[in-house]
């Protein structure tokens, strides 16, 4: 196969045709040939056909004629062979990822595919349909005939799953286009007759009904129907034809699935069909079909969603490996989202009853008996004992987030039903939980040694409450990442609609009395339903808090604790201190209960703060609960308006003092939790306070941190006692706190925080020396620098940026000095540790480099004389460092040269390069990060590279060569992309004796060999071609010499002439080659033709 492609232009057409005929005949005459051998021979035939399509020397018509004769023979063995021939053609033409690697460009493969999909693919489809029609008419099939039927059904699936390539799609986008997972059927106009014929659709429904009990064949038939359900594009001449097609399809679907019991193997396929119909066809087409048919379709969707939901819940209980119903259920819920969010084509309330059914079904599946069916098998018998939940198992709120978001949206659509339902269910379970805990407490008081009674009742209650809180959280608020969270319009409208029936005072009383039953408060039925639902969750929270105070923590569920604070955080982000300017209308109960300057908002902030303190006092062993709790605290202070209320609470100040003094139990919290807690305390300090109060706050929060740290490190015997556990804990806690302070950076607090942190950064460098043999501490010190650079560099003016540069450079010098040439006792373990360090250092350098592109600092900062003196002093120190790198600069005072982030980063690279061993570069993440940084510098600051000292310059060039020759294709591409700007810089400088000029000459030979003499990934041809052209422009004489040397080594005159002609054509469009974009594009086009003609000719494998 490779030989044919390599020698293609040397072969006569007759010879190629004879070879193709011989291969086909060889297979035909040997029906019992091994499958692998047969498939490889047929693949060679497909490659010959594809390569022949480039110069139109071969077409598929003669093959199709032969295949048609094979199919009509009636011999199953011969029909199977015909199917194999068609499958080989499909695979070869379908995509660049499945095609054989024959050294031709993506554009060539794309062009072949476009030609094939217009005529030949349609011909294959028609042949396949003929076979399926013939088989579908037969009553009984032998095992051999059934196997043939399955092969052709799979072939039809392959055709209908074809990713039709649009015209004029550039080579850069072909791979991206073909990598899409969800391929929809979008054929061209030429397919109208083949696909819009109603008999074709009916055939596939008939086929499925015939074979639906065979799970393997059913998957192919359902996938064919799913693809037909996604039909769109120019194949439809007008909207009317779309409506007719859709109506016909839905009729066929309903006739197929109504009144049958769906097999497990059908669930995913049917859900895919429905999902495609709803998401692909425009809403106006969907609503144009007969209304009765549409109603039947939606009723069917409702029934299937509820049914699949119940089966999915059963799958989860039985812990099945293949969760087919769960996948099907997820798809149907996504389809519901598409429908209910369209208020343009469907009037309000159109889907309400359907939403109620789906919502009720979901709730029922997640509640224990008698209200629900959770943990019951299909026969209604309780399931086996619940297994211990793995610590690695994902939390339900994350694992089922998409499901919960869909159910929450359906709950909003039917808010009139769903909000009171959730409230009733939660309140009833809170009452039962309270009673159970009281009963347990009395049992313990009566008999302290009475072990643990049967916990099933409590476990069921906790699981019920868990799911009810999750659904409530998703119903009341959206998960907004990086956006301003808004109250969902359906919730706001629901509250406004009923506000005239609401007694505000009673509503506030129910909200503010979480310790009492809602039904015990007079007039409880005249409260705002949304606020009452919130108060139901607060009642769960209150029961938990009282149990903690009664020393019943061992009876509580940590999962319920997590759910409560997760819900409160989600709710507070959206509702607490609601900004009325963001809404056209605001609910009076909402603005009264949670609005600015209201007693309700002050009360709830105080309550949430007490909840945080209660949790932190007991949950040091439950890290996930502690983490969720401090995240709630961050939510309370990250907005200035909320923070203003928080700092008015005495408990906040007590929390700050307790944390600053490292008092128990806060000092027992894990490091990540302490970091986030510090972030919250710092954010709270920027609330509105008078100067004296603010000074007092910082004195109580930050000063103890500084004092304790200095007291520890300034002890005379600190180096001797630094490894004592108590000292290490103090140092680790301080470093974590510094990361938290950095994470709290905002544009209006960066000046204060930077000044505070800079004092620590200097001392941290000293710690690097003391703890050089303690990897976890070194890693944490580097992380502090990473966080400060990441959060603050973009806001810093020149003097402060210089201070940070100086600190980072000193850190890297110390790290390098401590690690270069170091002998390692446990090499693998220490290599892993150094990998982590270097990864962080790469991140640090990348963060510093971002200053060149993202700079929000005040440019007027340096107008004052004092600032100028500060900048000059620091610049002198930085320049002293960097002069070690840039010794080639023209003489002059160092301070007169502006030190850029790029200078600093190059200096950093100089320090860590000796540590970057080939073994460390075997870590893919570190390797990619390293080469991305190098490429980034070469692309953006190529003028800096020639100024590097000799050792660093050689190391960089060696890194590029290593990346091109010994690393992954991704790294090789990065190195090629770095070469182009370096060669362009050389051409601008016109210094023919510079080290960079000599290095680029060496790289010309490397790239030349890569393109001409070696096999390479065709996706790299563009990057290699751009680098090659730039290098040829720079070294024209050397390029000519390389070509001459290659030609003179050829013994075969035919190959010599073929190569000579190809090289002449390659540079014909750019003689002499110059750095001009138009010429470069012409060269790249010629290079593709060059690769098609001689690519692989000289490769030896």
Image: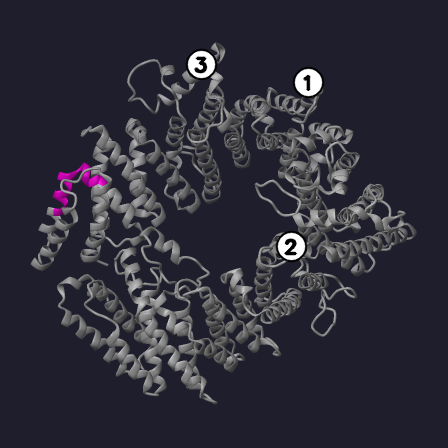
For disc 2, the marked residue is 409
The quarter of the picture where the N terminus appears is: bottom left
Q: Secondary structure at mark 3?
A: helix
| Quarter of the image where one finds residue 582 | top right
Label 2 to label 3: alpha-carbon separation: 60 Å
First of labels 2, 3 by sequence position: 2
The answer to whether residue 726 is seen in the rendering is: no
Residue 1050 vertical placement versus 586 (above, below): below
Magenta stretch holds residue 1041: yes
Nearer to me, 447 or 349? 349
Task: Residue lying at the far right in this picture: please name it.
Answer: 446
Q: Position of residue 649 (x, y in %)?
A: 76, 30
First of labels 2, 1 by sequence position: 2
For disc 1, the marked residue is 691
Task: Residue lying at the far top in this picture: please name it.
Answer: 865
Label 1 to label 3: alpha-carbon separation: 32 Å
Label 2 to label 1: alpha-carbon separation: 47 Å
Q: Secondary structure at mark 1?
A: helix
| Quarter of the image where one finds residue 122 | bottom left
């Amino acid at each position: 196969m490779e030989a044919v492609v390599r020698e293609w232009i040397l072969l006569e057409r007759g010879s190629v045709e004879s070879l193709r005929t011989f291969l086909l005949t060889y297979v035909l005459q040997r029906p019992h040939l091994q499958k692998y051998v047969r498939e490889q021979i047929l693949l060679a035939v497909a490659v010959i056909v594809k390569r022949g399509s480039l110069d139109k020397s071969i077409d598929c018509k003669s093959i199709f004629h032969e295949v048609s004769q094979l199919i009509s023979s009636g011999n199953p063995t011969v029909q199977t062979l015909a199917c194999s021939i068609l499958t080989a053609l499909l695979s070869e033409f379908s995509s660049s990822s499945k095609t054989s690697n024959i050294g031709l460009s993506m554009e060539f493969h794309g062009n072949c595919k476009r030609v094939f999909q217009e005529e030949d693919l349609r011909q294959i489809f028609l042949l396949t349909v003929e076979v399926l029609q013939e088989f579908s008419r037969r009553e009984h099939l032998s095992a051999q005939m059934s196997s043939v039927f399955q092969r052709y059904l799979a072939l039809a699936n392959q055709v209908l799953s074809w990713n039709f390539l649009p015209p004029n799609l550039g080579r850069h986008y072909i791979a991206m286009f073909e990598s899409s997972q969800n391929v929809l059927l979008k054929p061209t106009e030429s397919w109208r007759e083949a696909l819009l014929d109603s008999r074709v659709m009916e055939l596939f429904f008939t086929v499925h009904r015939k074979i639906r009990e065979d799970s393997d064949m059913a998957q192919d038939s359902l996938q064919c129907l799913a693809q037909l359900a996604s039909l769109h594009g120019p194949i439809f001449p007008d909207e009317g034809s779309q409506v007719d097609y859709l109506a016909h399809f839905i009729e066929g679907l309903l006739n197929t699935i109504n009144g049958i019991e769906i097999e497990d193997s059908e669930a995913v396929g049917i859900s895919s069909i429905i999902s495609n119909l709803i998401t692909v066809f425009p809403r106006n087409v969907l609503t144009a079909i007969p209304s009765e048919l549409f109603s039947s379709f939606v009723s069917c969707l409702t029934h299937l969603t509820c049914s699949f939901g119940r089966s999915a819940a059963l799958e989860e209980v039985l812990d099945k490996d293949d969760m087919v119903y769960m996948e099907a259920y997820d798809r149907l819920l996504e389809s519901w989202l598409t429908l209910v969010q369209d208020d343009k084509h469907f009037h309000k309330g159109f889907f309400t009853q359907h939403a109620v059914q789906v919502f009720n079904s979901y709730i029922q599946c997640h509640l224990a008996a008698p209200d629900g069916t959770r943990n019951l098998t299909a026969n209604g018998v309780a399931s086996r004992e619940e297994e211990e939940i793995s610590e690695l198992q994902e939390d339900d709120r994350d694992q089922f987030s998409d499901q919960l978001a869909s159910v929450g949206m359906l709950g909003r659509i039917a808010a009139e039903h769903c909000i009171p339902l959730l409230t009733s269910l939660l309140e009833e379970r809170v009452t039962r939980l309270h009673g159970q805990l009281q009963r347990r407490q009395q049992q313990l008081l009566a008999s302290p040694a009475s072990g643990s009674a049967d916990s099933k009742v409590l476990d069921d209650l906790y699981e019920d409450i868990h799911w009810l809180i999750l659904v409530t959280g998703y119903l009341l608020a959206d998960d907004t990442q990086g956006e301003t969270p808004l109250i969902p319009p359906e919730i706001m409208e629901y509250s406004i609609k009923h506000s005239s029936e609401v007694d505000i005072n009673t509503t506030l009383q129910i909200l503010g009395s979480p310790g009492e039953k809602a039904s015990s408060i007079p007039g409880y039925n005249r409260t705002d339903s949304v606020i009452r639902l919130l108060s139901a969750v607060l009642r769960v929270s209150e029961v938990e808090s009282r149990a903690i105070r009664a020393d019943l923590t061992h009876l509580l569920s940590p999962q319920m604790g997590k759910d409560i604070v997760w819900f409160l955080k989600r709710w507070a982000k959206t509702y607490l201190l609601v900004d009325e300017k963001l809404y056209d209308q605001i609910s009076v109960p909402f603005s009264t209960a949670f609005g600015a300057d209201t007693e309700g908002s002050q009360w709830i902030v105080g309550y949430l703060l007490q909840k945080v303190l209660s949790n932190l006092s007991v949950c040091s062993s439950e890290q996930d609960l502690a983490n969720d709790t401090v995240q709630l605290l961050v939510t309370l202070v990250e907005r200035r308006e909320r923070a203003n209320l928080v700092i008015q609470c005495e408990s906040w100040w007590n929390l700050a003092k307790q944390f600053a003094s490292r008092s128990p139990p806060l000092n027992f919290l894990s490091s990540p939790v302490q970091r986030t807690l510090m972030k919250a305390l710092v954010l709270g300090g920027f609330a509105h306070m008078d100067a004296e109060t603010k000074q007092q706050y910082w004195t109580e929060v930050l000063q103890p941190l500084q004092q304790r740290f200095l007291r520890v490190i300034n002890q005379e015997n600190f180096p001797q006692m630094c490894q004592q556990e108590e000292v290490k804990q103090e140092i680790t806690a301080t470093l974590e706190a510094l990361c938290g302070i950095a994470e709290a950076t905002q544009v209006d607090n960066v000046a204060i925080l930077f000044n505070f942190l800079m004092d620590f950064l200097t001392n941290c460098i000293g710690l690097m020396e003391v703890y050089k043999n303690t990897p976890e501490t070194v890693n944490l010190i580097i992380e502090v620098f990473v966080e400060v650079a990441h959060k603050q560099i973009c806001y810093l003016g020149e003097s402060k940026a210089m201070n940070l540069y100086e600190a980072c450079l000193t850190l890297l010098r110390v790290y390098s000095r401590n690690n270069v040439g170091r002998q390692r006792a446990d090499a693998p373990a220490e290599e892993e540790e150094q990998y982590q360090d270097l990864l962080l250092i790469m991140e640090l350098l990348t963060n510093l480099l971002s200053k060149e592109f993202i700079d929000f600092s005040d440019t007027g900062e340096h107008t004052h004389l004092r600032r100028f003196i500060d900048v000059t002093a620091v610049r002198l120190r930085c320049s002293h460092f960097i002069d070690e790198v840039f010794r080639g600069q023209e003489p002059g005072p160092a301070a007169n040269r502006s030190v850029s982030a790029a200078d600093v980063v190059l200096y950093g690279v100089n320090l860590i390069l000796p540590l970057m061993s080939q073994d460390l570069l075997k870590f893919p993440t570190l390797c990619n990060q390293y080469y991305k940084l190098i490429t980034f510098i070469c692309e953006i600051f190529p003028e800096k590279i020639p100024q590097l000292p000799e050792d660093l310059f050689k190391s960089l060039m060696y890194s590029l060569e290593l990346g091109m020759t010994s690393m992954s294709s991704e790294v090789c591409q990065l190195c090629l992309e770095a070469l182009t700007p370096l060669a362009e810089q050389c051409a601008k400088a016109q210094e023919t004796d510079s080290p960079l000029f000599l290095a680029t000459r060496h790289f010309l030979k490397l790239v030349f060999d890569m393109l001409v003499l070696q096999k390479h990934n065709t996706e790299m041809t563009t990057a290699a071609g751009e680098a090659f052209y730039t290098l040829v422009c720079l070294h024209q004489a050397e390029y000519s010499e390389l070509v001459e040397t290659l030609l003179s080594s050829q013994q075969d005159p035919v190959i010599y002439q073929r190569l000579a002609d190809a090289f002449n054509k390659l540079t014909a469009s750019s003689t002499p080659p110059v750095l001009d974009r138009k010429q470069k594009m012409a060269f790249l086009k010629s290079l593709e033709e060059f690769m098609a003609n001689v690519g692989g000719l000289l490769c030896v494998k």
